[in-house]
Amino acid sequence: MMIKEREMYMQEVVLQTNNITKKYKDFVALDSASITIHKGDIYGLIGRNGAGKTTLMKLVTTLTTKSGGSFSLFGNEDELIESKRRIGCLIESPAFFENLTAYQNLKYYSIQKGIVDEEQINKVLKVVDLYKEKNKKFKKFSLGMKQRLGIAFALLDNPDFIILDEPINGLDPIGIKEIRDTLKRLNEEEKITILVSSHILSELYLLANHFCFIDKGRIIKDISKEELDLECSKCIVIKTNDVKKATVILEQELKTTNYKVIDDIEIRLYDYLENSAKVNKTLLTNDVEITAIYESGISLEDYFNSLIKEGVK
């Protein structure tokens, strides 16, 4: 795909919510949530249990009704029935029959959905890497295999967009990797846009390219992976009133371009992490006025916890 085509592809909006709200009497489960998901995204929804992740997913799949706000799918706000046909979801796991095989279970749901092409069953089983197990009874599946069969169920309608609620919950490391590999393959090879939720940021980080943090029903941060890396990466923060001169010295004297200019007064340097004193001395020697210099960087978990504590918008 050419760069310009790729940019146009990523600019197409698949889901947009505008101040969408859900109330249960006096309890606000979701409070004025606004998100935008572009075609090609793997959009990670992060939050503790009960934060509002499932409520948001149920609203945009019309499994429950909204109390306020609006949303559009594929640019359509009014023609949701037609747009929903392009969506697959795994929010409440389908009731698979223990004594039926993987193939038989999917055939049952294919009939319910009006899908007549039985080859579609084989196709989705291959996509989730369960084709060789298609004649095995569901009760003999591991938890990870059951989750992948659930994803196969979500793919039966050949969707452009899938919504998955906590697909790695309760899985062991092998099962988590299997789900992650499956979702990456769906995104990269099948060009499917994905909205996936989890309460484990470190795992979702390995999968998603955009993150939305939600707590107590409110969106507290919406951030790209590049921005998240920038905020979490270990670095030397340099505060100066002459950013331009400082960057010239970094390049000429310290022979590094591994830095990022944040604004008019801040540079983040990703080299010399063990020798910030040398950076400070070099800048001062070259008459760069430093107002502050210090090391920064936090773990993903600490970042998540700090957002919840601060309630950052």
Image (cartoon, grey):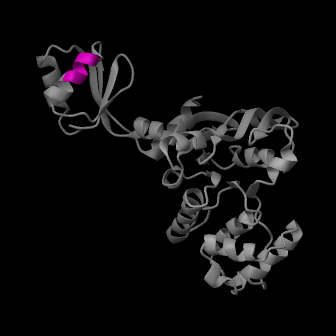
Toward which corner of the image does residue 289 lie, by quadrant?
Answer: top left
Q: Is residue 115 left or right of residue 50?
A: right
Segment tinted magenta in the rendering: 244-248
Toward which corner of the image does residue 39 lie, by quadrant?
Answer: top right
Q: Is residue 313 on the magenta stretch? A: no
Toward which corner of the image does residue 248 lie, by quadrant?
Answer: top left
Total numbered labels: 0
In this picture, is 304 found above or below 18?
A: below
Of 55 and 39, nearer the camera is 39
**Residue 57: percent from left, percent from top:** 74, 48
Of 104 and 100, nearer the camera is 104
In this picture, is 164 found above or below 302?
A: below
Measuring 58% from the left and 35% from the top, which residue is drawn there? 222
For the stretch drawn in magenta, the main secondary structure is helix
Q: Can residue 62 be seen in the rendering of this structure?
A: no
Quarter that holds the C terminus: top right
Q: Is residue 293 left or right of residue 32?
A: left
Measuring 66% from the left and 68% from the top, which residue is drawn there? 147
Of 259 and 54, nearer the camera is 259
Q: Can residue 107 be seen in the rendering of this structure?
A: yes
**Residue 151: percent from left, percent from top:** 68, 65
Measuring 15% from the left and 13% from the top, which residue is drawn there? 287
**Residue 254: percent from left, percent from top:** 15, 31
**Residue 175: percent from left, percent from top:** 55, 70
Q: Is residue 22 left or right of residue 158?
A: right
Q: Is residue 284 left or right of residue 180?
A: left
